Amino acid sequence: MATLTVHPDRLLPTEPGVREIARRLYGAVRDLPIISPHGHVDPKLLLDDQPFADPTSLFIQPDHYVTRLLHTAGIGLDRLGVAEGPLPEDRARQAWRLLCGHWHVLRGTPVRYWFDSELAEIFGVTERPGADNADALYDQIAEQLRRPSHRPRALLRRFGIEFLATTDDPADDLAAHEALRDDPDVSTTVAPTFRPDRYLEIGRPGWAETVKGLGDAGDYASYLDALAERRQYFIARGAVSADHGHADAGAEPLELHDAQRIYRAALAGAVTDAEALAFRRHMTYEMARMSCDDGLVMTLHPGVYRNHHPETLQRYGPDTGHDIPVAVEYTRALQPLLERFGNHPGLHLVLFTVDPDVYSREIAPLAGFYPSVYAGAPWWFLDNPSEIRRFQEAVTETAGFSRLSGFIDDTRAFCSIPARHDMSRRLDAGFLAGLVAAHRLDEDEALDTLTALVVDQPRKVFKL
Amino acid sequence: MATLTVHPDRLLPTEPGVREIARRLYGAVRDLPIISPHGHVDPKLLLDDQPFADPTSLFIQPDHYVTRLLHTAGIGLDRLGVAEGPLPEDRARQAWRLLCGHWHVLRGTPVRYWFDSELAEIFGVTERPGADNADALYDQIAEQLRRPSHRPRALLRRFGIEFLATTDDPADDLAAHEALRDDPDVSTTVAPTFRPDRYLEIGRPGWAETVKGLGDAGDYASYLDALAERRQYFIARGAVSADHGHADAGAEPLELHDAQRIYRAALAGAVTDAEALAFRRHMTYEMARMSCDDGLVMTLHPGVYRNHHPETLQRYGPDTGHDIPVAVEYTRALQPLLERFGNHPGLHLVLFTVDPDVYSREIAPLAGFYPSVYAGAPWWFLDNPSEIRRFQEAVTETAGFSRLSGFIDDTRAFCSIPARHDMSRRLDAGFLAGLVAAHRLDEDEALDTLTALVVDQPRKVFKL
Amino acid sequence: MATLTVHPDRLLPTEPGVREIARRLYGAVRDLPIISPHGHVDPKLLLDDQPFADPTSLFIQPDHYVTRLLHTAGIGLDRLGVAEGPLPEDRARQAWRLLCGHWHVLRGTPVRYWFDSELAEIFGVTERPGADNADALYDQIAEQLRRPSHRPRALLRRFGIEFLATTDDPADDLAAHEALRDDPDVSTTVAPTFRPDRYLEIGRPGWAETVKGLGDAGDYASYLDALAERRQYFIARGAVSADHGHADAGAEPLELHDAQRIYRAALAGAVTDAEALAFRRHMTYEMARMSCDDGLVMTLHPGVYRNHHPETLQRYGPDTGHDIPVAVEYTRALQPLLERFGNHPGLHLVLFTVDPDVYSREIAPLAGFYPSVYAGAPWWFLDNPSEIRRFQEAVTETAGFSRLSGFIDDTRAFCSIPARHDMSRRLDAGFLAGLVAAHRLDEDEALDTLTALVVDQPRKVFKL
């Protein structure tokens, strides 16, 4: 049986001299608290604090990073319990066996890396998963999941998470967040995030019904008021940011009468695609305006073709592994917004991308001039060592380190949070060690920079 | 006189610890058989088994990698015998002198690397080519080319090529392939590849004449039947794949009556550019449908502006070094095809590109969800160490190693085949050694992965 | 107080074996003369040879690389004296304090690297700048600036600059260049560069007035003649190149009567945007034709959204840090030009970019076929170690080293010229050392290549 070990030097540079510097740097930040200003953990998980049902519901079912890789091997998502609640034990165990039996499929991916860390460090696993030991590992993990030490809140404490943002519908009452805030047993700040996409995309089927969730939105003016009020509601419950994930980064204002007219058409179900697009770009601009007023950090992550495989969407719902990136453009798209608000002291605009081409071409130059613009950490498909290295190089050489958002885990896989942050710290330490070894930075500066990336920068950028 | 040496550690990582791992990995696959599922060797070369005429006809005339680099130095393609048959000795020798005299022009390119390997390992050359020794090297190589040991079949055996795909016109009778298959002297499987581009691009001048080569194609239905029959003809003679190299990756079906109407217009020479484009994208979709039925692997490599310099095309024909890449898009272009066939067990769709931007942005995410999609190895302009490294990083971090096609040499330079595969093995060994050194993979896994890339993966992806 | 040291091995590879090779290579070119065929130094600086006013006017005010980074920290450009002449001492000192107090903002950028070199090597600074020592450093530098040794001409000699190109308006009388040429005290060749952008963009406000600067340009024919004459005027005063920086790389000829008609419309102030665009692309083609005739090297650097923040433009003018790159395309755009002139022996066309995606996809393949096309060195946002490495890899693997322009400093920061060229030499030495260490190149070839990049290649490409 092959062993599973997590080496203390993993991910650090391989050249011994550079590794030695990286070790020192990493050692100084390894145990700093985790700040997670963008993610997808369900607050009810922490509120209810129920034991995780089984390894499959913890590691496989909710994580499209895992299920899409198994899907490539011809495994139907139904066999993995995607879009289902907890499975009967035989099905849960069967799904786990599929994961372990296809362990080689994960080689080279960050998913494998996170799994190694999670299995070793949270569950004490010492064997590499495979077809042979799948059942034994299932039992070993399942047994621990029943212990108090492995309930969500206990893990939250153990992980050292100081701040955890969730992602929430503007119509959500945020009762879970309120309860967590008032619970003396929870010292982590669990903050909601305002995610208004579906309220802004007025051409979506059902939008006229959806928008009622905001309250009175019978005309354009009341719609704006309702959005502003919901933002205040979120802010009062700890929200620090609003998150926007449309197809493109367009942010161009309409004339008021055009916005009013299109809004009326949308309520009547008579909006054209072009009008809906123009309105959404207008509203992105308006959201920036509101951010200047109310201070919510604005995060933007366009450029994803959502639900590329309609049959999978129909059977399993969204976020099931078939969102595919497309090329994205920021320079022209954001010009109207930045012309108006780019120097506004109230605006923090964090630009994420899944198109790495824009790092050096557009994001770094924008973040290298506008005080409001920050380069969001590599995210989603790009949260892996080689793309993180590409990001570090592409952005810092043009914009320096002070324009980085700090790490974003963006995950719904609760147990992967520490592994993801740890990966980031190791890679930042390694990158900075390279600058020291090339005599471009003194080691005290590298250490200061690394600490800033881990804690100071996210606090500043997300106004914590 | 400078020496020419091929170092046993060439292309391996330079850090001694990583190099040591890479050496072990590479050593284990160095002598495995060569599988070449896509290339451009002329099967008649192997059928006739005539000695190569001279060094120029072997190394220069047929290889646009070489002639385009000499062309940059102001050397007219006429002086290199491009698009001519074997040259008179004085001209052949003169062309060879031009190559040797411009040896510095090749520095840093893979062409230089392949040459070094070929000259040293096949012809025992020990001096670096230059103006001074051009004639002596010409004589040394020419002398060997006359020996039985350096005829095509002898080299084929020596190279250890287990499977060699050629690229063929759908109207080809494949007589050479049949003869090679029946020849007990040839143990390599020499398989044809179905390359229907010019039959699908109905707006090309002369298409109405070209299409007659398929047999009865007097209306759309018989055209489809004829294509399907030619595919069967190819399959019966060993073909495993159909290769498509259009200007873009579009694959969107037309309504039947539109396809029929456009087809009729094309036969009448009255098709518009827009119709021809729509029809070609429709036919790419249809080719995928046929692949689901008959099992031919579908390889796609769009994004090349062919024959950028018309005067060169006119004087020397196509494939003479002035095809230039353009940006390419897969996510939207392939959506209709993948919506319909992406999960079909009969489809293997291998995506190649000469636009490296799409590796991490589009190809890896597509190959990281759809079980039918594979990431084709870096190809043409990208088959060099730095782009191969970029590919390895961009694709494997998102999609793992199991979605890679394995190496494709894509060459018409027969003697470069072993050097190209050897380069790939060295670079794969180096990349995997890096993962081992960073403690992301155990060495036994790296070895297993490397072996898969060299032999198992091409066999699986190309259904050998 | 932290020290400021410039290590002799800075920027060289970190692996000791490779570094050793790189040291040898770098050592051989470190002291070669500087050839600077493209930049923005004001020739009057050298003509007048007045002492620099103070550290702020030398290092901050004219350099948008520096001011944009400070601007990201919320520092208004007014506080930095942007677009002002020499400041009163209190304001100059205050701006310098802002720079030193935000020294951390520069970490990881080439600006920091250049500063380190300049401060240490030109001004003997031994302390890292910070809030605490800002005044002392100001005084230390200011004192030296008053010495004869630190006047512009003395520095020019000390920097070892053999050739220095400026960038000039076609209507400029080039009196400063003439005077410098005739001055026995100046041994550097200071050559003008023909930069006709604003004369070719006929839709610009005020163009009809601007064009009068060329002389008689009352119809299209006389306009062409006037441009050709101004080019001759520049050539007679030492110009070797014409520089073009439009929004895109389009170069497509119009029919003569269309060109004439559009030109008339422009003079009448009645040109449409589409006509102006077509005319500018036509004129890019015409400029190539003139280059074939008169031999001026043609440099092209499209793809920049100029003056992204209009308020900053209005207050401080252009070139104040908010030009932002956009995606660019060469393959299709340049096809008409290259179809006609690509093989012309009189044309040298140097392609620059701020969109690094085109290096391997378009520039290298174009430079790898057409003898007229050269790959311009990484420039502006890309003149940093990681992008230079990306350029080296992307271009040389496809096109070899002989297609590179050699380094271009493109700077208006006079004192940064030696630091920029030194950075380039170190990075080229490191890259070539890597090829030697991977046994792809012999060390004598690497040395020959490095020398070519530093002196021979710029001389050849820019016809010096």
Image: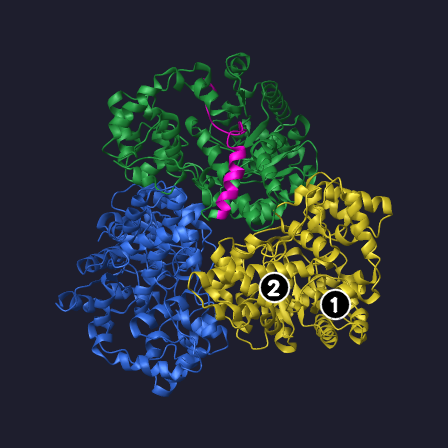
Chain colours: A yellow, B green, C blue
Residue A288 vs residue B302: left or right?
right
Residue B328 visible in the shown view: no
- Residue B18 lies in the magenta-colored region: yes
Identified by mark 2, the residue type is Phe
Tell me the residue that label 2 is attached to. Answer: A407
Which residues lie in the magenta part? B17-44
Name the image quarter holding the C terminus of chain A: bottom right
Which of disc 1 and disc 2 is earlier in sequence?
1
Q: Position of residue B357 (x, y in %)?
A: 52, 48
Identified by mark 1, the residue type is Arg
C-alpha span from label 2 to label 1: 20 Å
- Position of residue A210 relative to residue B85, above or below, is below
Front residue of A256/B404: it is B404
Instruction: Say which chain tag 2 marks.
Output: A
The local crowd at label 2, few if under 14, some if 14 to 19, many if 20 or more residues have their Cα within 10 Å, is many
- Position of residue C188 relative to residue A386, above or below, is below
Tell me the residue that label 1 is attached to. Answer: A157
